[in-house]
Image: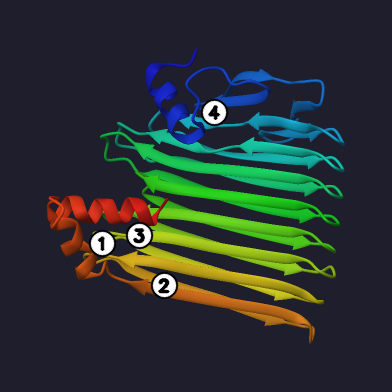
Amino acid sequence: MIDTIQKRLLAEVADLHQVPEGAYNIRANGQMEARNTTANIDIVSKQDVSGIDIHIKPGTKNESVHIPVVLSQSGLKEMVYNDFYIGEGADVTIVAGCGIDNCGGQDSEHDGVHRFYLGKDARVKYVEKHYGSGSGSGKRILNPGTEVYMEENSFMEMEMVQIKGVDSTARTTTAKLEAGAKLVVRERLMTHEDQQAVSSYEVYLNGEGASADIVSRSVARDTSYQKFDSRIIGNVSCSGHTECDAIIMDDARILAIPQLEANDVDAALIHEAAIGKIAGEQIVKLMTLGLTEAEAEEQIINGFLK
């Protein structure tokens, strides 16, 4: 039975305030809590390791899959493997995410590998949110790994969000794109206190006309540390863009490493990176409207991370 804390975590990471429509698999404290399948989307538990296989039939339209994970037990550490098989011409939304509430003295950790196999002309919107809470001294640790394999003319949009409460995270994403496939990534991240966050992306543009657009917006506060490492490899006539835009505050540190590798004369690749503090004139302008300095900072940060 989902308790009050777990319900709050589900609302934070998956916008779930009630049982969702469509297919879902809800995992709580290392166990499958609830599951539903549909005529077009099947969810099956793996037999050899912890995790699930999600099979989406070709041509499936306007359906969703929710697979949130919540941890409210201090000291729990788990590793799961989830594989998604998206049939040709399908168009679906997949909502994942993990919330950890740690009120104890032991570290709580959720590590997972998500593998996506997109058939020809398939379209996927993938949303993954991370959230941490709890008054305990134990850390809240999340280490997600994502692998994406995209067949011809498929499309995937990934929204990766981590705004609050995660002490340590190492996110790794690799993708391989065939002809005409397109990958769009939008990452939003905020760290504070002594939190650490590492994001690594490696995208291989292997088919003619493949494209990737990877954009990260982040805010680092207090003594936190962030590393953004993005590498796009263009092996054919293709296009790629990677961008890191970060606000640094207090005694935080940020390392941005955008990398491009062109292995074809027609590979058009661009990278951008900008790190800086909040402009003083922005704060002054908002303060003239009646906000305090702290309120002005929060307003700017919230707008930046939208």
Residue under label 2: 255
**Sequence-first tag of 4 and 3:** 4
Q: Residues within 10 Å of mark 2 (few under 14, many from 20)?
A: some
Q: Nearer the viewer, residue 300 or 14?
A: 300
The Cα–Cα distance between marks 4 and 3, rounded to whole angstroms, is 31 Å
**Sequence-first tag of 2 and 1:** 1
User: Which amino acid is tagged 2?
Assistant: Leu
User: Which amino acid is tagged 4?
Assistant: Gly
User: Is residue 75 at least partly visible in the picture?
Assistant: no
Give the secondary structure at mark 3: strand
User: Is residue 174 at least partly visible in the picture?
Assistant: yes
The Cα–Cα distance between marks 1 and 4, rounded to whole angstroms, is 32 Å
Report x, y in % for residue 93: 67, 37
What residue do we see at 44% from left, 60% from top?
217
The mark closer to the camera, 1 or 3, is 3
Which circle marks residue 167 in the picture?
A: none
What residue do we see at 86% from left, 35% from top?
59
Contact? badges 3 and 2 (CB < 8 Å)? no
Residue under label 3: 219
Above or below, 273 against 2 in this view is below
Report x, y in % for residue 263: 77, 83
Name the quadrant containing residue 62: top right
Which circle marks residue 223 in the picture?
A: 1
Residue under label 4: 30
Contact? badges 2 and 4 (CB < 8 Å)? no
Give the residue at the far front of this rendering.
289
User: Which amino acid is tagged 1?
Assistant: Thr
User: Which amino acid is tagged 3?
Assistant: Val
Report x, y in % for residue 301: 31, 55
